[in-house]
Image (cartoon, helix red, strand yellow):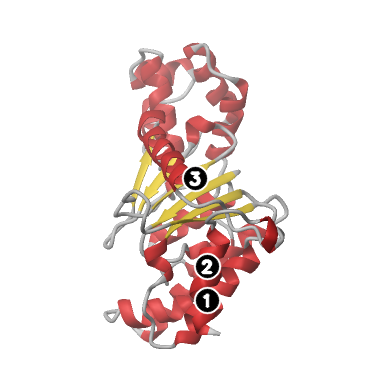
Amino acid sequence: MGLRVNPTYRQRRFGAEVRRLRERAGMSVAEAAALMGMRQPHLSNAEAARTGLSPDRVRLLATTVGGISTTYIEALIELGQSSGKGWWSTYRGLLDDPHLDLAELESGATGLDNYEPMFIPGLLQTRGYAEAIYRDGYANLSEEDKEAAVRFRIDRQDVLRSEAPPEFHAIVHEAALHLGLRDRTVMRDQLIHLIEVSRLPNVTIQVLPFEGRVGFGSGFMVIRPIVPELATAVVSHIERDLYLEGTQAVGKYQGWFGKLSEQALPPIDASVPPDARLGKNSLGLVQRLLYPLL
């Protein structure tokens, strides 16, 4: 098997984790390669995500380090066995790699914590809303590229209804609910969709109101796999999203998300009778904004 030319984020993450294990063991590449019965270039290529490692070699390296949980080791092995292929593969060549990396990470997550200050989160957007965003905000893209991006965004949402869906917690700033679109029916349908999708047992949606404390200016998502040490924080940027890893870096965003959740209104819960909703809440705010659009 030849070396990978364009490894995915998960494959790069596997290589980075292997390098961290080796460094924790206090071993050089040559020493670790000798321990695992392989040539030095093979290990160098594995750390650079150009190739993988067998499960036995991963376990041997982790055992040498000591104090590594079995859960982490098995999750790392699974990460290393990733082919990088999935439903998103059909978009390869149509969209940039970061789009595909995000979908791959979401597919293996047990939890997704998403904060958005200006737009409805991609996993909650209607097709009409996504089309409006790409039509008005991405003038430099061709019509074909816009259509591919919209289809991809809608296809991503299948993860919320998959066989083993992740717990999705979205915090949306109230500013996103006031976004002016050419067609008012687009925002009407989007607000209705927020209420409907909140009925899914794995979906929690909160609104951060204007009168609350100022939220972050950039959106971000914390993607949580079964092992916390392998979590990733994806920070939105107009040019290219920033992928952060490591317990300290990701922990900051998890902490900030927790603070935002405390400041936000109680989650949308369409199952609660109107007379049982005391005080301000996310559903009440959405309904207030929806009423003039009906």
The residue drawn where x is 34% and y is 83% is 142
Q: CA distance from mark 3 to mark 1?
A: 31 Å
Instruction: Identify the mark at residue 223; answer none if there is no mark.
Output: 3
Q: Which residue is mark 1?
A: 290
Mark 2 neighbour class, 10 Å CA radius: few under 14, some 14 to 19, many 20 or more? some
Residue 277 lies, in percent from the top left, at 63, 56
| Mark sitting earlier along the chain (2/3) | 3
Residue 71 lies, in percent from the top left, at 61, 26
- Judged by depth in the image, the label closer to the viewer, 2 or 3, is 2
| Mark sitting earlier along the chain (3/1) | 3
Which residue type carries mark 1? Answer: Leu
**Dot 1 lies on which element?**
helix
Q: CA distance from mark 2 to mark 3?
A: 26 Å
Instruction: Identify the mark at residue 124; answer none if there is no mark.
Output: none
**Are circles 1 and 2 on residues that touch, CB within 8 Å?**
yes
Q: CA distance from mark 1 to mark 2?
A: 6 Å
